[in-house]
Amino acid sequence: MDNHQVVATLNKLLETTKDGESGFHTCAEGVTRPGLKTMFEAAARRCDEGATELEAEIRRLGGEPAASGTVGGSLHRAWTNIKSSITGKDEHGVLAECERGEDVAKSTYEAALKEDLPPDVKAIVRGQYEGAKANHDRIRDLRNQTGQAS
């Protein structure tokens, strides 16, 4: 895989990460329970840290990092639909919408891991995938708990 392709893959992940950060901020605004708000804000910070790591790697490879999240495609729709979807919803609904966004993020990382990335780049992607998976699982578990409490 040449550098151009590696940079393109990393930029796709960068866009995904920026979309996730924005989506988590939106979810934090959509809930009132302090613990849940804190969890979403922490997830947004982790996305920001991941974006910073990807930007550095893209520059190291001679590329230019994407300036923002996606402007099209399923991930953008998943996260931007959260804002309209969570208005007036209970915590369970907000968590369900957030989980949908994280489903797409997980898929994007899984696709990147199937590519022939250099070992050092693959290690970064794998680490970030594990973070996205942990976010997803945490949100899924909370969604399941709030669904049982209803």
Image: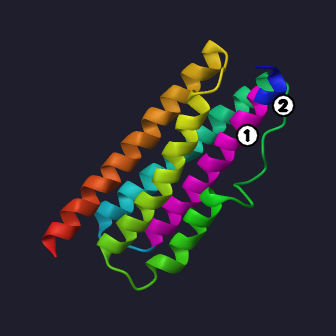
> Which residue type carries mark 1?
Asn
Q: Which residue is mark 1?
A: 11
**Image position of 137 with respect to 143: above or below:** above
Quarter in which the N terminus is drawn: top right
Q: The C terminus appears in which quarter of the rendering?
A: bottom left
Q: Residues within 10 Å of mark 1 (few under 14, many from 20)?
A: many
Measure the alpha-carbon separation of dots 2 and 1: 9 Å
Q: Residue at x 14, y 71 (%)?
A: 149
Judged from this view, the residue extending furthest toward the left is 149
First in sequence, mark 2 or 1: give its number.
1
Secondary structure under the numbered disc 1 in the rendered image: helix
Left or right, residue 48 beside residue 24: right
84 on left or right of 52:
left
By secondary structure, the bulk of the magenta-drawn segment is best described as helix
Query: Image check: 98 left or right of 143?
Result: right
Residue sitting at x 74%, y 54%: 68
Residue 27 in percent (x, y) is at 45, 67
Instruction: Please say if 45 is above or below 149.
Output: above
Query: In which quadrant of the rendered view does residue 11 lie?
Result: top right
Q: Which residue is mark 2?
A: 63
Total numbered circles: 2
- Residue 52 position, x and y percent, is 65, 38
**Mark 2 crowdedness (10 Å alpha carbons): few <14, some 14-19, many ≥20:** some
Percent position of residue 25, x then y: 51, 63
Q: Residue at x 46, y 82 (%)?
A: 87
Above or below 19: residue 88: below
Q: Secondary structure at mark 2?
A: loop
Which residue range is magenta in the image?
A: 6-29
Residue sitting at x 56%, y 64%: 78
Q: Is there CB contact under 8 Å for labels 2 and 1? A: yes
Per the image, is 103 magenta?
A: no
x and y percent of residue 142 in the render? Answer: 26, 58
